[in-house]
Image (spheres, rainbow, N blue to C red):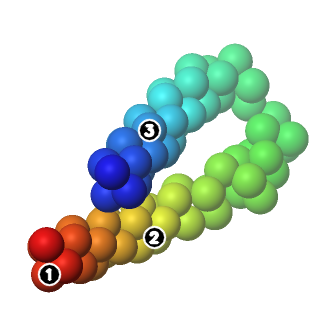
């Protein structure tokens, strides 16, 4: 079940990133000042690549765990 938990967690993280992006786009329609740009640059812009790298790592880990489970069966 560890692999299933990893896949479920990765799916939730991916969905959360998508929701964050959608909500941020909505917020930027109303919030268009220096603080908005700074928040995006300092917090949101660095977040997406980190989450993508994490999701890639989780996928590789899930693959490795599946192989290990098959090999041990």
Mark found first going from the N terminus, 2 or 3: 3
Is 42 on the left or on the right of 59, as rendered? right
Residue furthest toward the front?
A: 73
Identify residue for label 1.
71
Q: x%, y% of residue 22?
A: 48, 28
Q: Nearer the viewer, mark 2 or mark 1?
A: 1
Q: With respect to residue 16, does 13 lie above or below?
A: below
Q: Residue at x 65, y 23 (%)?
A: 27
Q: Residue at x 22, y 71 (%)?
A: 69
Mark number displayed over residue 25: none
Q: x%, y% of residue 44?
A: 66, 50
Q: Quadrant of residue 63?
A: bottom left
Q: Which structural element holds mark 2?
A: helix
Q: Which structural element holds mark 3?
A: helix
Q: x%, y% of residue 18?
A: 44, 37
Mark found first going from the N terminus, 3 or 1: 3
Q: Quadrant of residue 30?
A: top right
Q: Nearer the viewer, mark 3 or mark 1?
A: 1
Identify residue for label 3.
12
Is 59 on the left or on the right of 10, as rendered? left
Q: Quadrant of residue 26?
A: top right
In front of the other: 42 or 51: 51
Image quarter in which the C terminus is found: bottom left
Q: Which structural element holds mark 1?
A: helix
Marks 3 and 1 sit apart, C-alpha to C-alpha, by 28 Å
Q: Residue at x 38, y 56 (%)?
A: 2
Mark 2 is surrounded, within 10 Å at the Cα level, by few (under 14), some (14 to 19) or many (20 or more) other residues, namely few
Mark 3 is surrounded, within 10 Å at the Cα level, by few (under 14), some (14 to 19) or many (20 or more) other residues, namely few
Identify residue for label 2.
53
């Amino acid at each position: 079940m560890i692999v299933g938990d990893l896949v479920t967690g990765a799916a939730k993280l991916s969905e959360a990133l998508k929701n964050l992006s959608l909500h941020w786009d909505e917020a930027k329609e109303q919030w268009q000042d220096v603080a908005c740009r700074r928040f995006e640059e300092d917090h949101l812009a660095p977040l997406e690549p980190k989450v993508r790298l994490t999701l890639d790592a989780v996928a590789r880990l899930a693959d490795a765990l599946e192989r290990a489970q098959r090999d041990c069966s």
